[in-house]
Amino acid sequence: QVQLVESGGGLVQAGGSLRLSCAASERTLSTYAMGWFRQAPGKEREFVAAIDWNGNNLYYTDSVKGRFTISRDNAKITVYLRMNSLKPEDTAVYYCAADGRTSRLRAGIVSHDYWGQGTQVTVSS
């Protein structure tokens, strides 16, 4: 059974940085597009960033462009989200996900229900 395990969340002051990690349990996911989503209290889950299987194509939602960077290490079957210049509005539970295509991730579609359990990011003002 495929598992995605996030780590790296926490409490940080506005302007600070965090790096989230998402480790996959199956090596086949090194051939999948990977993405990050977030869900703030009272809001729907939203797309944050995605990376294709070889790291050549990156996608971001507008609100995080220039502040967040997605990357991956296929040898470790791990995807990362470096978050700089954090703002209180970035506060949310962050989830990683895997799918065969970045286009589906960007549309919020995650085939096979490959989701992590989430990690909390709280940015204080």
Image: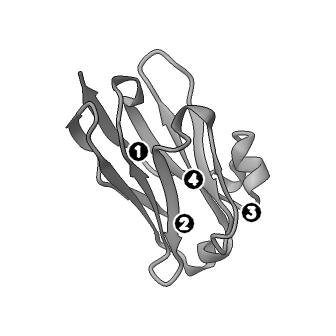
Q: CA distance from mark 1 to mark 3?
A: 20 Å
Vertical arrangement, residue 70 with respect to residue 41, above or below: below
- Which residue has dot 4 on it? 97
Which numbered mark, 1 or 2, is in the foreground of this view?
1
Q: Quadrant of residue 118?
A: top left
| Amino acid beneath label 1 | Gly
Badge 1 or badge 4: first in the primary sequence: 4
* Residue found 62% across the figure and 38% down from its top: 61
Say the numbered circle drawn on residue 27: none
| Amino acid beneath label 4 | Ala
Q: Nearer the viewer, residue 69 or 101?
A: 69
Are the residues at dot 1 and dot 2 in contact (C-beta closer than 8 Å)? Answer: no
- Mark 3 neighbour density, 10 Å: few (under 14) some (14–19) many (20 or more): some
- Mark 4 neighbour density, 10 Å: few (under 14) some (14–19) many (20 or more): many
Q: Secondary structure at mark 4?
A: strand
Q: Secondary structure at mark 3?
A: loop
Q: CA distance from mark 3 to mark 4?
A: 10 Å
Residue 31: x, y in percent?
Answer: 67, 75
Extreme-front residue of the structure: 66
Q: Quick check: 24 left or right of 104?
A: left
**Quadrant location of the N terminus in the rendered image:** bottom right
Q: Quick check: 87 left or right of 111?
A: left
Q: CA distance from mark 1 to mark 4?
A: 10 Å
- Mark 2 neighbour density, 10 Å: few (under 14) some (14–19) many (20 or more): some
Say the numbered circle drawn on residue 2: 2
* Residue found 21% across the figure and 37% down from its top: 11
